[in-house]
Amino acid sequence: MAANTIPIFPLTPKISWGTSLATANTAKDGTGTVVLLATAGANGSRVDFLRVRALGTNVATALRIFVNNGADPTVAANNVLFTEATIAATTLSEVAALAETQIAMDLALPAGYRLYATIGTTVAAGLMVSAVFGDY
């Protein structure tokens, strides 16, 4: 007998973001300097995508996204590297928009699970990462 034959959709739309990312973290286990992006609600959440914006002039870096099981993120066993993206170098301009990166997630998070972000290279102006998701 098949289970879950009727699709469910998020009930409460959310957009969240952490503090600006500017300091490098070369750990690939989710420990070290991390920024919390989102926490799944009591019934879990669906993460649609992440939007990454440079806050000014930056060198290129790698953005890494970790899924945490809701426990202490300083313990490597509680984190998994979910995805990563190359973020191009940017130069601040008052007449042209800075490049934006969108990362498709299509991810269902269990209740209490979290998303964290790190970058591989220290950048001058910082990056702001926003999560677009919804709680079930």
Image (tube, rainbow, N blue to C red):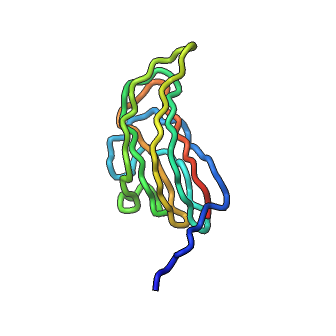
Q: Position of residue 67 (x, y in %)?
A: 43, 56
Query: Image check: 38 left or right of 65?
Result: right
Q: Position of residue 14 (x, y in %)?
A: 63, 51
Q: Position of residue 50 (x, y in %)?
A: 50, 44
Residue shown at the point (49%, 31%) measured from the top left: 100
Q: Quadrant of residue 45?
A: bottom right
Task: Give above or below for 119 relative to 16.
Answer: above
Query: Image check: 94 left or right of 30?
Result: right
Task: Give above or below for 113 relative to 117.
Answer: below
Considering the image in quadrants, where does the C terminus appear? bottom right
Query: Image check: 133 left or right of 103?
Result: right
Q: Quadrant of residue 10?
A: bottom right
Q: Position of residue 123 (x, y in %)?
A: 42, 28
Residue shown at the point (56%, 73%) measured from the top left: 6
- Tag count in the figure? 0
Give whichever of 136, 125 is nearer the camera: 136
Give whichever of 56, 83 is nearer the camera: 83
Residue shown at the point (51%, 66%) measured from the top left: 110
Residue shown at the point (57%, 52%) measured from the top left: 133
Give whichever of 100, 3 is nearer the camera: 3
Q: Outermost residue toward the bottom? A: 1
